[in-house]
Image (cartoon, rainbow, N blue to C red):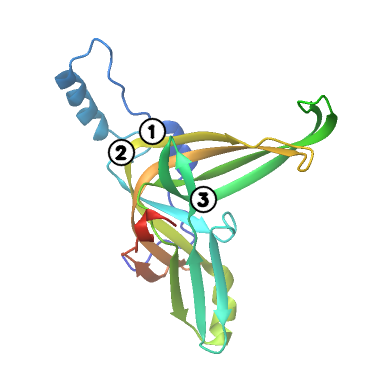
Amino acid sequence: IQQLPPRFSGHDVLGIHKKLQPPRKGEFEKTADFEARYAAWSERAFMGSLRPSSVLAIEVSQVLAPGTISVDYSADSEELNIKLSFERHNVSDQKARWLETFYTSKNLGPRLATTRMGVKFRVTSHLGSSVGIAMREQLQNVAVSIKSPPEQARLLKTKLTSFAIVSLVEPFSVYEEEASTASLDKPEEWLTRRFGVWATLKSVWIVNRETGEVLQKIDSFPRCKYDTC
C-alpha cells in the first residue's frame, strides 16, 4: 500500500480498549473447553469488522501526540527529520515501551495535606490520562529523514503524520494507574491513568495526512542495548 484515503485517521485505540474483552477460564472449566472457546473468540469480530487477530493502523499525530512525534527541518541538507519517541514504563509489572497516541490533563484544585510531623500544607492535585500502545520489545526511538526542498517542506511539515502498524497480543487491554506523592518541597500530586492495548510493532508509516500518500515505511526496529533504553 502506497496510498491511504485522504485524512485517514486509523483505528481507535480507546474504543478497542473498551470493546476488546478476552474470555477468562472458569474455575470449573476444563482446559480443552476453554481453549476451544478462546479460539472461537479470537476469530470473532469485536468492533465492526475488527478481530483480535486483525492488523491495526494507529495514528500518532503532531496534533494529538506532540510529545511522541516531532518533525523538524534541516535547510542545509534539505531534509524533514521525523522522530517517534517511546516512553519507558512498567505495565502490569512488565517492562514495556509505551507509544503515546493521546494525552490530556486536568487540574483538580487544591487540598490540605499533613506531614508526619503534623505540618499542614496546601497541595495541588492533577489528573492525567494517557492513551497508547504497550510493547514488550524494548525498541529504540524511531528516526527517519525525508528529502524535501524548502518550499515543499514548508507546506508538508504540518501535514505529516505517522501510523503504527501493529498486531494485538495478550493480555490485549491496558489499564494502569500511577500516583505521585506531594511533599513540602514539591506540593503537587499526580494521578496518571493509562488506557490502551498490548501490541507488537510491525511497521511505521510516514504519511501526508491531507492526501493519504505514504511517503516512507520503516519495517525494522533496533532494540535498546541490553534491553535498557
Q: Closer to the camera, 161 or 143?
A: 143
Residue pointed to by mark 2? 52
Mark carried by residue 20: 1
- Quadrant for the N terminus, please: bottom left
The x, y position of residue 141, in whole percent, is 45, 62
Q: Is residue 159 above or below residue 104?
A: below
Residue pointed to by mark 3? 100
Q: Is residue 118 above or below residue 50?
A: above
SS of the residue under disc 2: loop
Query: Mark 2, mark 3: which one is toward the viewer?
Result: 3
Viewer can see residue 209: no
Q: Earlier in the sequence, mark 2 or mark 3?
A: 2
Crowd rating for badge 2 (residues with CA inside 10 Å; few <14, some 14–19, many 20+): many
**Residue most toward the front?**
117
| 65 left or right, relative to 203 | right
Identity of the residue drawn at 43% across and 59% down: 163
The reply to whether discs 2 and 3 touch (Cβ–Cβ < 8 Å) is: no
Identity of the residue drawn at 31% across and 41% down: 169
**Residue most toward the bottom?**
76
Residues at marks 2 and 1, CA–CA distance in whole angstroms: 8 Å
Viewer can see residue 90: yes
Residues at marks 1 and 3, CA–CA distance in whole angstroms: 19 Å
Identity of the residue drawn at 45% across and 76% down: 145
Which amino acid does the dot numbered 3 rest on?
Answer: Glu
Q: Earlier in the sequence, mark 1 or mark 3?
A: 1
Residues at marks 2 and 3, CA–CA distance in whole angstroms: 21 Å
